[in-house]
Amino acid sequence: FRSKLGGYIRGDGAVQIPLAFEGGGEFSEGIAPVRLEGKWGFIDQHGTFTAKPGFEAANPSYEGRAGCKRDGLYGFCTKAGVPVIPFRFDWVFGFSEGVSAVTVGKKTGYVDRAGAVVVPLKYDNAGEFSEGRAWVVVLDKCGYIDRLGREVTPIRFTACGDYSEGIAHAYDREVMGYIDKQGEWLIRPRYQNGSSFLHGMATVKTGDYFGYIDHSGKTVIPFQFDVALPF
């Protein structure tokens, strides 16, 4: 952004799409949502509109569906801005593994790509599906469901992360550990925070420093960093 207008740059810092927009989102599946004269539409990687601004809000596209808002409610549209799921939700997430979390009032559930409800809207919050699991919240606790809506772990954790490499990070009160797909602790809670596993390692914090552990919880890079990111 410069002078309240935004555009997009390449990896070398050169401007790819001129600074002409009042707002914008990330590129996904070849398009990005942008705002012009108070309305949202979509552009391609050349800055050409695939959907002219006409929405009150718009989200990035995932699995061929982008959240878009009209008359105060969200639905889903194509990259060309054609509505494919009616505007009937108070909020929508992104599609992942064929479904998306949606919210009406204070309750969240999931719909498929046709807009049919596949998990009832009964949760207080919910995440995107990853490796066949999504975290859901009931009151102040979270657990995991599968794509059929079955609760495959107890709703007993303080906070939950996404599954990666068959493992998810979860909190028991103020400390974090890692669980398997049945919700059993693989690495007992003992960290202040940490990341998902990637390439067999996760970054975790204990005391004042971050280090890296493997799937067994063994330290593979000592705790010595003020900040550490996943590989």
Image: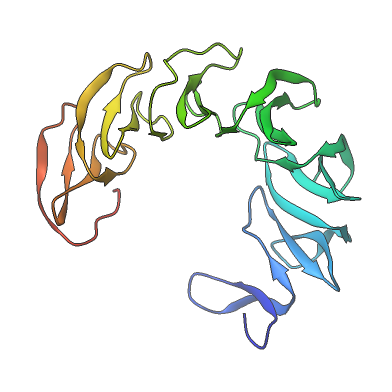
Instruction: Work out whether 170 lies above or below 82.
Output: above
Q: Residue at x 69, y 65 (%)?
A: 24
Q: Quadrant of the N terminus?
A: bottom right
Give coordinates of residue 101: x percent, y percent: 65, 32
Is 82 left or right of 28, judged from the image as shown?
right
Q: How is the image coloured?
A: rainbow
Task: Give left or right: position of 63 versus 160.
Answer: right
Identify which residue is drawn at 17% across, 44% down: 212
In this rendering, does residue 195 appear at all? yes
Residue nearer the viewer, 103 or 166: 103
Report x, y in % for residue 220: 11, 41
Residue 34 lies, in percent from the top left, at 75, 64
Occupied quadrant, residue 38:
bottom right
Q: Please say if 4 is above or below 30.
A: below
Q: Looking at the rendering, which quadrant does residue 89 occupy?
A: top right
Residue 178 position within the rendered picture, expressed as x and y whole percent measured from the top left: 28, 29
Counting every numbered tag in the picture gives: 0
> Which residue is at 69% across, 35% downward?
106
Residue at image coords 52%, 29%:
137
Q: Name the quadrant containing residue 26.
A: bottom right
| Figure check: 46 above or below 32 | below
Q: Residue furthest front?
A: 139
In the foreground, 205 or 39: 205
On the question of residue 80 being in view, the answer is no
